[in-house]
Image (cartoon, rainbow, N blue to C red):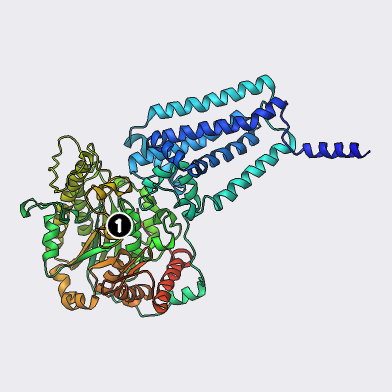
């Protein structure tokens, strides 16, 4: 009787375990899924923009990295094989998912020089609408992927027809596997793949340049890591009511001085040619007009400290526009613009409340960084993108800076003709990376590079092409300033670069130039594009320029998140804003806050603050989170 009872119990248990049609199938099922998962991983690595041999080297030297790329494929395949009841159907669908994402990543890297983020899937329709007309698709890879998926599906169909559910699961055990693999996927996503300590433990990942990190760590692992890291981290001891009280402190009505505010951000504009290894004479100056401007006594100039090297334009824009330092809220994760799902207070909204007409121009595709949705959420009343331009002049693969200058001037002329004060923010794009030899057409002249350091041919070529873009940006700067000088309207003008150029993975080009940690003065030395602030004669009189500049106490080196606040102080707009008033007070004591380092007004660097100063930084973080996530903002009419 006891034996029979044990047999009945065993049969009951078996009903909840895999029940394939034969013991042979049972033995083959797991090894087959393991092998097919490995095949899908190899295909995905082959599709990636980096070389297969490099990833093999990464995987063999760091087995955990191989596991982090393999496990998502395996778990998805178990889930789909269980769901369909057919291992080969599961393999085909798994390859469709991971292979398709890998292909999308490769295409995005080609057209945007940036990897695929999970949040990009929200923009799939917009992206697909321009893919066919803007790039050459890798048809061989697409063909191989389609044939492989079709082959797996056909094999699954033929074997299912022959043996009726080969390698499939029966009864409750099938759904048990679906449940277990689904739960496992969720748990791993929010634990192992979320872990920043694991992510940064691998060698080779250049985490300040996200595309380099994707290439070094593998697309699948990187993509899974960013599923959960694209969120805004809530600071410790955050109290919504406390932050709301800070934000609602009444300082009075906006009292802007009646000057127009014009901002131009130059894509990858830097003063790199001024570094000692580039011996350009005055007659051969790469950025002569910029040098003319900063030499003037009526111009404020210096360097901004940004959070990104070789990319991250939208983060620099976000920091300047909002006063929120994105990197401190979500360090090392996705771009700020990808997390803007609701209306956010910004410099646009402050000037709008003071009666200004606000606008934003970027001659790139409107879906880049989701700008067509983000800028209205930040308060820009009108936006202009490349799709709004009629037959724009293309140079270096993007709208030419000269054409962007013409577009900005025409927008300023039109808006100011209505008699309303304006706030305009324009970001140009011509000098966007990469700086490959095929960036410009063969008939475009690229002046040879002058450099005292012997460089590899590819780095020398990159720099020569990058300097070509600097020359054109400098010329467009001259055109804009010339218009502002003669327009007859009071203008406060701000110009700055968004980040230093991409010169190879892991910043190899900077090392070849000798710009290494042991010779650079600060950890953020390669994160310092220049800035200048100038007012035309009409605006100088209204602003009482000399006294306004003196009272501003603007540091030569400044975190970009403080720049917008400084502009609002110059024009008087900050007087009614508790937020921008707080930022202007903080920047006077600590003009640079960067990845756990703080530079005080005397140029001293520290990583530990006095309790009172740390409390101010903590307040900034909490207040930033409130303005980013919890502050209710009413919409007003905007146009794209």
Badge 1 density bin: few <14, some 14–19, many ≥20, Cα 10 Å: many
* Residue carrying label 1: 360
Query: In this figure, what is the number of numbered marks?
Result: 1
Name the residue at the right extreme.
Answer: 1
Residue drawn at x 82%, y 36% as measured from the top left: 11
Counting from the top left corner in percent of width and height, residue 56 is at 43, 36
Q: Is 5 in front, or is 494? A: 5
Counting from the top left corner in percent of width and height, residue 156 is at 60, 25
Residue drawn at x 28%, y 62% as measured from the top left: 522
**Residue 450 in sight here:** yes
Q: Quadrant of residue 141?
A: top left
Of helix, strand and loop, which one carries label 1?
strand
**Compared with residue 367, is residue 20 higher up or lower down, i.e. above or below?**
above
**Compared with residue 175, is residue 451 higher up or lower down, i.e. above or below?**
below
Residue drawn at x 11%, y 67% as measured from the top left: 296
Counting from the top left corner in percent of width and height, residue 579 is at 38, 73
**Compared with residue 630, is residue 112 higher up or lower down, i.e. above or below?**
above
Counting from the top left corner in percent of width and height, residue 158 is at 62, 20
Q: Quadrant of residue 291?
A: bottom left
Quadrant into which the N terminus falls: top right
Left/right placement of residue 196 relative to residue 455 reads right
Name the residue at the top extreme.
Answer: 162
Q: Is 569 in front, or is 316? A: 316
**Residue 496 in sight here:** no
């Amino acid at each position: 009787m006891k034996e029979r009872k044990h047999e009945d119990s065993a049969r009951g248990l078996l009903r909840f375990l895999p029940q394939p049609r034969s013991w042979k199938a049972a033995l083959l099922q797991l090894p087959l899924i393991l092998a097919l998962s490995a095949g899908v991983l190899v295909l995905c690595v082959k599709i990636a923009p980096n070389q297969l041999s490099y990833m093999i080297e990464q995987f063999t030297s760091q087995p955990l990295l191989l596991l982090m790329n393999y496990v998502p494929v395996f778990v998805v395949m178990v889930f789909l094989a269980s769901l369909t009841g057919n291992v080969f159907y599961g393999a085909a669908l798994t390859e469709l998912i991971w292979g398709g994402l890998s292909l999308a990543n490769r295409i995005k890297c080609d057209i945007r020089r940036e990897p695929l983020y999970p949040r990009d899937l929200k923009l799939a329709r917009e992206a697909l609408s321009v893919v066919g007309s803007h790039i050459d698709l890798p048809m061989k890879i697409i063909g191989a992927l389609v044939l492989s998926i079709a082959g797996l599906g056909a094999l699954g169909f033929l074997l299912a027809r022959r043996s009726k559910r080969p390698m499939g699961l029966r009864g409750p055990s099938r759904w048990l596997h679906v449940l277990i693999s689904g739960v496992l996927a969720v748990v791993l996503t929010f634990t192992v793949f979320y872990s920043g300590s694991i992510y940064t433990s691998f060698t080779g990942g250049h985490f300040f340049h996200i595309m380099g990190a994707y290439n070094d760590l593998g697309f699948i692992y990187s993509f899974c890591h960013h599923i959960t890291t694209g969120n805004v981290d809530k600071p410790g001891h955050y109290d919504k009511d406390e932050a709301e009280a800070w934000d609602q402190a009444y300082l009075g009505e906006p009292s802007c001085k009646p000057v127009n505010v014009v901002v131009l951000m130059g894509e990858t504009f830097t003063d790199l040619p001024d570094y000692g290894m580039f011996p350009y004479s005055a007659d051969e100056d790469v950025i002569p007009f910029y040098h003319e401007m900063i030499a003037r006594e009526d111009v404020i100039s210096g360097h901004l400290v940004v959070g990104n090297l070789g990319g991250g334009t939208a983060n620099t824009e976000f920091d300047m526009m909002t006063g929120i330092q994105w990197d401190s809220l979500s360090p090392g994760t996705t771009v700020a613009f990808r997390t803007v799902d609701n209306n956010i207070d910004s410099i646009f909204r402050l000037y709008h409340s003071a009666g200004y007409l606000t606008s934003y121009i970027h001659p790139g595709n409107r879906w880049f960084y989701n700008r067509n949705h983000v800028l209205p959420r930040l308060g820009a009343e009108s936006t202009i993108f490349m799709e709004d331009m009629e037959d724009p002049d293309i140079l270096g693969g993007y709208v030419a800076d000269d054409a962007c200058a013409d577009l900005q001037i025409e927008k300023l002329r039109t808006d100011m003709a209505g008699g309303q004060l304006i706030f305009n923010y324009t970001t140009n794009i011509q000098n966007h990376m990469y700086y490959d030899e095929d960036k410009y057409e063969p008939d475009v002249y690229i002046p040879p590079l002058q450099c005292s350091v012997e460089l590899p041919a590819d780095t020398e070529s990159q720099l020569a092409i990058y300097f070509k873009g600097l020359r054109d940006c400098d010329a467009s700067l001259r055109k804009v300033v010339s218009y502002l000088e003669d327009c007859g309207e009071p203008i406060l003008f701000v110009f700055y670069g968004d980040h230093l150029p991409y010169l190879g993975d892991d910043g190899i080009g900077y090392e070849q130039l000798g710009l290494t940690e042991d010779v650079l003065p600060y950890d953020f030395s390669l994160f310092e594009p220049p800035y200048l602030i100038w007012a035309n004669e009409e605006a100088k009189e209204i602003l009482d320029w000399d006294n306004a500049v003196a009272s501003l106490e603007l540091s030569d080196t400044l975190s970009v998140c403080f720049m917008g606040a400084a502009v609002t102080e110059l024009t008087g707009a900050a007087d009614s804003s508790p937020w921008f008033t707080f930022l202007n007070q903080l920047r006077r004591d600590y003009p640079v806050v960067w990845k756990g380092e703080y530079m005080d007004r005397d140029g001293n660097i520290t990583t530990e603050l006095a309790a009172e100063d740390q409390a101010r930084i903590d307040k900034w973080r909490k207040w930033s989170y409130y303005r980013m996530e919890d502050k209710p903002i009413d919409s007003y009419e905007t146009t794209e």
